[in-house]
Image (spheres, grey):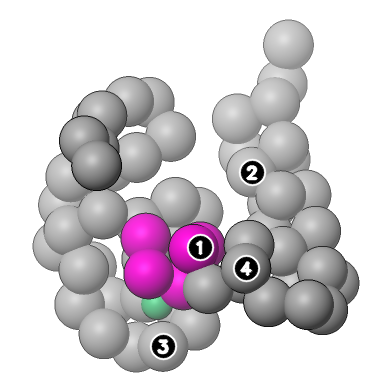
Amino acid sequence: MTVAVEDTVMAEPRPCTRCSRVSLLWVVGRCADCVAEMGLQDDRAEYEAWKADVQAEYGRK
Ligand SMILES: [Zn+2]
């Protein structure tokens, strides 16, 4: 799997707001691991909430 560093993925070490681990790859506060975890779990509520945050942060067009 290749990881593309784009506008929505900041390469800067910061603690994840969800699991508190310091990660280089995170999107609106959640690390890549959490994003994957949220996307795979049966309960979509958390993933939908994250997507709404992405929209709020980057969807202003
Ligand atoms: Zn995390």
Q: Which residue is mark 1?
A: 35
Q: Residue 4 has which mark? A: none
Element under label 4?
helix
Please identify the quarter of the rendering in which residue 54 is found.
top right
Q: Depth check: 28 or 42 in front?
A: 42
Seen as rendered, the residue at the extreme front is 1
- Label 2 with label 1: CB-CB less than 8 Å: no
Q: Position of residue 11 (x, y in %)?
A: 18, 45
Label 4 beta carbon less than 8 Å to ligand 1? no
Q: Amino acid at mark 4?
A: Leu
What residue type is disc 2 on? Val
Q: Is mark 1 within 8 Å of ligand 1?
A: yes
Q: Using residue 54 as the reference point, say whether residue 36 is left or right of it.
A: left
Q: Is residue 27 left or right of residue 14?
A: right
> Which is closer to the viewer, label 3 or label 4?
4
How crowded is the residue under tag 3: few (<14 C-alpha within 10 Å), some, or many (20+)? few
